Image: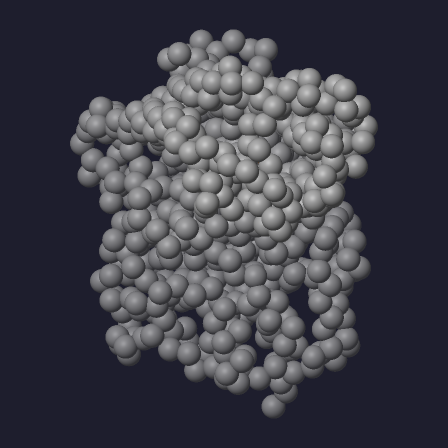
Amino acid sequence: MDTPKSNKDKIQNKMRISSSILYITLGASSGTLFLWLSSYAFPEGDINIGRSVFGNIPKFIQYSFYLTTIVTILITGYLFSLRSRNWERGLPEKRNKLFGERFIQLFKALNMDTVRRFKSAGLMHSLIYVGFVVLFIGTVTLEIHHLMPPTYKFLQGLTYQIYSAILDAASLMYIFGLTWALYRRIFTSEERIRSKTLNDDFLTLAVLLFIGISGLTTEAARIALINRPSFEVWSFVGYPLSFLIPSNIASQFHQISWVLHVLSFFIFLILLPITKLRHIITSPFNMYLSPQAKHKGAMSDMGNLLEATDIETIGVSNIEDFTWKQLFDLDACTVCGRCTSVCPANATGKMLDPREIVLKIGQVMSESGSPPVSSTVSNSTDLKVSSSSVFELITPEEIWACTSCKACDEICPVNIEILDKILDIRRHLSLMVSDFPSELGKAYVAMENSSNPWGASQDKRLDWTKELDFDVPVLGQPGTETTEYLYWVGCAGAFDDRNIHVTRAVATLLQRANVSYAVLGPKEQCTGDSARRTGNEFVYQQLAIQNIETMNSYKIKKVIAQCPHCFNTIANEYPQLGGDYEVIHHSQLLTELVTSGRIEVGTTENPYSITYHDSCYLGRHNDIYMAPREIVGSIGGIEIREMKRQGTKSFCCGAGGGRMWMEESEGKKINIERVTEAVETGADEVAVACPFCYIMIDDGVKELGKDEHVRVRDVSLILLDNLKKD
Ligand code: SF4
Ligand code: SF4
């Protein structure tokens, strides 16, 4: 378990990434020097069907080429090392295990898997990427061929002809992809691209395009210079182009084109660390580094705060409070804006824009660096950064607007961890400066005083059982010693009028299927999810530690959670405090019971349609998408209609991240946006599998005046209503 951040941590954190980069740079430039010297080892020899590597290039230009290559590599490496000093400002974080997962992520990056999820952008990037990689490998192959003794030179005859054809095809792909990218930048109607298209983008695209075009003109001039031998027709682009170059100027044309081609590549290398192009290097590394020991639904471990004695600061307010990995991934951002395009807060007019969060933190990091390095392109580039505080550019309003839905993290093509940064900043706002919405203060007080955010008396935890015609077993009662499952009802399930019906339905189904279960009753306290997601780690830990002690005292091994937030907290976060349980969501258990025949499902009397609203904490945080759909799908006569945004791209109900307890005064209401989408499906009913979603969606349907036509129910209630008649 990590300890809270202290001075000791900061002093120990010397990653020396910049030194490693400088060593790699020195290695690369020494390698180039070696290649240069080695190139004199063997004469070129006579090649009938092939090409002379430095043919028509004067010796002094050849020397300048090698020298400039060495200098450019040194400059590029040095500029990267300056950037990396910013990453070293962060706190330690271990990302050195899980090699299997890391290499899978790296493979995905190199295979462009995450970018190819988006059809047109994926194809465009693939054309550029594959073209560039093939051309680069082709150049390296040519250099190897160049260094070989004459008898081993392999780029001749048919091999040379195939090599030429492949490189010309790669050039075409590369140029086509870049032209497409330029066209997209100039003529796009997509706000996420238009708003971030800067002169930088045109410069980098123009340089890349020039590399491709000058490569072809150099080839065409070379072919014209040697009088277009028939074997060169395999260069199916360069050969016809060579007819455009008059023979009398072919030599000068070739030399000028060759020099410009090489120069443009040097410019590309210099632009790499100082422009957005850096993502070519940093994004694959970021994906390699992305697997973490913690579950993706868990917040970072802060250790036991209640026992800590040397806490200097909590959460993040300065760049130095992030970990080095959190800082590194700021430099991996491709500025694509996909995170913003799926953010429910942004879509409904709140100040929060996840891309801006990444760019603004990146800007503070870059400009407060020693020395400052080129900044990212946030909307705040005209604001002067005078310290390393993230609040130079970020306002608390942005941070509090987040519903922690994880849509941004899930869609990011380069695995940038946006949500963790927001939640870490919340920890500072909540615990260090008490800068949180006043309504949240009431929920904190209720959680501290009544052990639940509703502020209800713990004595009422079992009130939901009163209308049942069977007894609900409570742990501690005789006969519950060998109970298999603890049924974790949750605060909403115990105190909220609508969700009490869900609790009764789940208990009835468990009873009917003869599941061995019991509840904690008044000994169950809030899991602390809302406190943790709003940054109040103290209140969270007080509740969590007490719950873990209670569960351990009953030797609990398996838990059925009715609420996805409770599910996520108990399954993925309680292990950080020593509570290890096998947790199952009620939709998963009910699916198992239906599949095994312990619950027999019937057919609805009147066929109707249902649309299912994915809960963020069940879906994106825990990858449970199918269980609730399977329950509804098992009922005869029900048609499932999916909403436009579903599964990993589902749209939040607006209650996660503690937003349940905050007013939504800015912009359109998130639940109204979601309900509008649900209503558009024409479904008669919206199925949910989360108590917060139940409240938000049901309220939204009522607010839109659609409650006479559209019903909202938890999947357990729908199942109970459609059991096979005896
Ligand atoms: S977690 Fe959801 S609400 Fe928060 S920034 Fe990401 S997309 Fe927006
Ligand atoms: S954080 Fe990810 S999704 Fe958002 S702009 Fe950057 S690369 Fe794109």
Of 398 and 50, the residue lying toward us: 50
- Res 594 quadrant in image: bottom right
Q: Residue at x 53, y 80 (%)?
A: 595
Q: How far across and how far down the image is residue 601, in percent?
A: 61, 81
Work out whether 626 lies above or below 257. Answer: below
Q: How is the image coloured?
A: one colour
| Quadrant where the image shows the C terminus | bottom right
- Res 461 quadrant in image: bottom left
Query: In the shown orientation, is residue 489 left or right of residue 676?
Result: left
Q: Name the outermost residue toward the front.
A: 46
Of 189 and 550, the residue lying toward us: 189
| Quadrant where the image shows the N terminus | top left
Work out whether 330 lies above or below 338. Answer: above
Q: Is residue 99 visible to the viewer in this orientation of the structure?
A: yes
- Res 197 quadrant in image: top right
Q: Residue at x 24, y 67 (%)?
A: 555
Q: How far across and how far down the image is residue 540, in percent?
A: 35, 43
